[in-house]
Amino acid sequence: MSGQDRLPELSKSPELPTLPTLPTGSRVLVAGCGFVGLQAARRLQAKGWRVTGLTHSQESASALAGEPFPVVACDIADRATLAALAQESGGFPAVIDAVSSGRGGADAYRHAYLEGARSLLETLRPQRFVFASSTSVYAQTGGELVDEQSPAEPQRETGRILRETEELVLSHGGQVARLGGIYAPERWVLWRKFCSGEAVIEGDGSRYLNQIHRDDAAAALVFLLAEVSEPGLFNVTDGTWPTLREVYEAFARATNRPLPPYGPVNPDRKRGWTHKRVLTTRLQQLGWQPEYRGVTKAIAAVRALVRQEKRAQF
């Protein structure tokens, strides 16, 4: 990193209020027990928190019936159902909002994120609220370094809905975790496309990627709730910024396969095309560190999973 690129270290503003510290054993609602939320719920349960998980569908809730905590099907924008659940459970002083839009468009985003967060905040009135957002709200395209003080002005309506949700959460004294592109051995879009032959290196492949392993994302949400008394914005990535070409080069080396073909840049991504390096200085200064840094360890985990799947077939 050159001196020209370097951003000043972030410091805590004296105007920020201190959030209440909840004791272990407090009740916590994890809204969105999916890819990241389920891992966060498991971590909280293991730490001694009294967890209730929410999913959007009964099918998803039934699939999680074996978890050591209750998982309930609930539309979080349905305030009457939320209120009844809170009354039955004795209330929820802590909430992690890790819902997804189900790959929908602007209407699905508005319902799941904005209306959902407003319903959780106003119905449950929790003392602590953590919202899982996205680094896609940073619309920078010049490869520059960005931190929580950088402009976040997404060009797409879906991104603007996320920003509106972030502002809502911040206005209630909550914490917003801007997660990078989330992956795990069993669900990594770039790896799947590489293995299926669908991958394309867009442009010259120099676009920076800001990624975070699913387990590190979940750990960051739990860390914010359990260990951090500051409200505000927190970037959550592994901080390595590989380019798209570098990732596919790593895949090619690991599998002895050729690089994918080059192709045009796709400007029609749902959350917009961006090219930036997201800093996680604030969260790291508070003591959080990712376990998975860079693609090498992640590729090893993917290959281990593939070997397990092959053994299970015999």
Image (cartoon, helix red, strand yellow):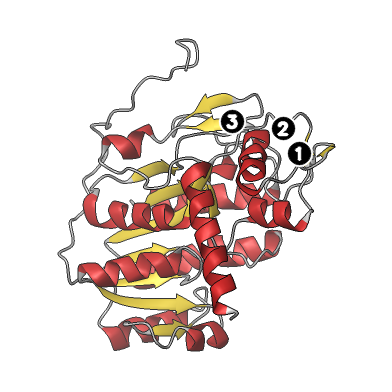
Residue at 47%, 57% (x, y): give it: 214
Kindly identify the amino acid type of the residue bearing the numbered disc 3.
Lys
Residue 239 as seen in the image, left or right of residue 157: left
Residue at 45%, 31% (x, y): give it: 147
For this orientation, the residue located farthest to the right is 264
Q: Position of residue 252 (x, y in %)?
A: 67, 43
Disc 1 marks which residue? 201
Judge whether residue 276 can be spotted in this image.
yes
CA–CA distance in space, label 1 to label 2: 5 Å
Residue 53 as seen in the image, left or right of residue 259: left
Asked whether the beta carbons under mark 1 and mark 2 sit within 8 Å of each other, the answer is yes
Disc 3 marks which residue? 276
Kindly identify the amino acid type of the residue bearing the numbered disc 2.
Gly
Residue at 39%, 70% (x, y): give it: 30
Picture quarter containing residue 187?
bottom right
**Within-10-Å neighbours for mark 2: few <14, some 14–19, many 20+:** some
Judging from the image, what secondary structure is the residue with disc 3 in? strand
